[in-house]
Image: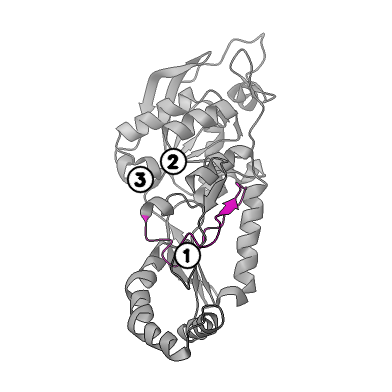
Amino acid sequence: MEKLKHGQAVDIPKYDFKSYKNDVFPARRVNPSDVIILEGILIFHDPRVRDLMSMKIFVDTDADVRLARRIRRDTVQKGRDINTVLDQYSKFVKPAFDDFILPTKKYADVIIPRGGDNHVAIDLIVQHIRTKLGQHDLCKIYPNLYVIHSTFQVVEHGLGHLPFTEKQVITPTDSVYTGVDFCKRLCGVSVIRSGESMENALRACCKGIKIGKILIHREGDNGQELIYEKLPNDISDRHVLLLDPILGTGNSAVQAISLLIKKGVPESNIIFLNLISAPQGVHVVCKRFPRIKIVTSEIEVGLNEDYRVVPGMGEFGDRYFGTDDDDQPPVPVVPH
């Protein structure tokens, strides 16, 4: 699996069920591809294998159907008599399924009842794969990178990655509606000053949300000097939406994320929301923090000699706050 994910072809032994050997038939050459399907009854047992998977699917089929298929397969393809098949099933196969296969169901991201007959579930999985294939090539390298198609949905998409619980409410018509409730321990953190442009969108989605501030000195490609920070005292117990519309070199993002981790925020509890990213910044952040999630709406060509994202839109804070007139002195920002 690791070789296939790195674009290398592999030779897979073909097992002979009659002789119980791997060397009866020539090995099967498997070439790398954008989509790799790995199938097996114990496929979720080894955590090293699970970690290589982008999506884990458990096909939940009725026990009677499984037995009927086994009888048909073993008698026709393996040349066994039905009494031997039933004896093996009752003594070994069924108990082993209950003890070793069924418990791995908890690792699945998607559970499909009725197997191949569930066309709705299959269509949803196919659509998900097509969406992934249509994303930027960097998404194939970093599973924690998400590129969406509209800048108006960055905050909403980021919220979709938060843990939630099922909640029932009574509507004005006395009907019961079942929905979801986001985790209460949530806050936003904006990187001053361009990150403040995303605060209204976050507040529109989460009324009364706490928002912290981080000010980082950025000169050229140097984004490593922390000037000011004001964060919730209990931020270590919260999921954090880090707001900065432009991901350029990645140095400022690394500084901000490092500060959050130093304050006790688990890396997996940080979702970095931005609008425009440069490939260089994506590489820097994803390699340094593989467990955070990055949600962006566009990955541009790269950086110019001034470390600005190109084609990009220049300094986002100046464009948003209307301070991009070269004849006017810069407007000071006083954190509060």
Choose the circle earlier in sequence order: 1 or 3: 1
Secondary structure found at label 1: loop
Residue picked out by circle 2:
292
In the displayed structure, 193 sits above or below 182; it is above
- Residue drawn at 38 percent across, 72 percent down: 102
- The quarter of the picture where the C terminus appears is top left
Residue picked out by circle 1:
40
The location of residue 140, given as percent across then percent down, is: 58, 43
**CA gap, disc 1 and disc 2:** 30 Å
The location of residue 35, given as percent across then percent down, is: 60, 52
Kindly identify which numbered label has been placed on residue 238: 3
Q: Are marks 3 and 2 in contact (CB under 8 Å)?
A: no
**Image quadrant in which you'd find residue 187:** top left
Callout 1 crowding tier (Cα within 10 Å): few <14, some 14–19, many ≥20: few
Secondary structure found at label 3: loop
Quick one: 147 or 162, which is closer to the camera? 147
The location of residue 178, given as percent across then percent down, is: 49, 71
Amino acid under label 3?
Answer: Arg
Secondary structure found at label 2: loop
Callout 2 crowding tier (Cα within 10 Å): few <14, some 14–19, many ≥20: some
Quick one: 210 or 118, which is closer to the camera? 118
In the displayed structure, 281 sits above or below 236; it is above
- Residue drawn at 36 percent across, 34 percent down: 260
Question: From the viewer's perspective, is the residue at label 1 or at label 2 nearer?
Answer: 1
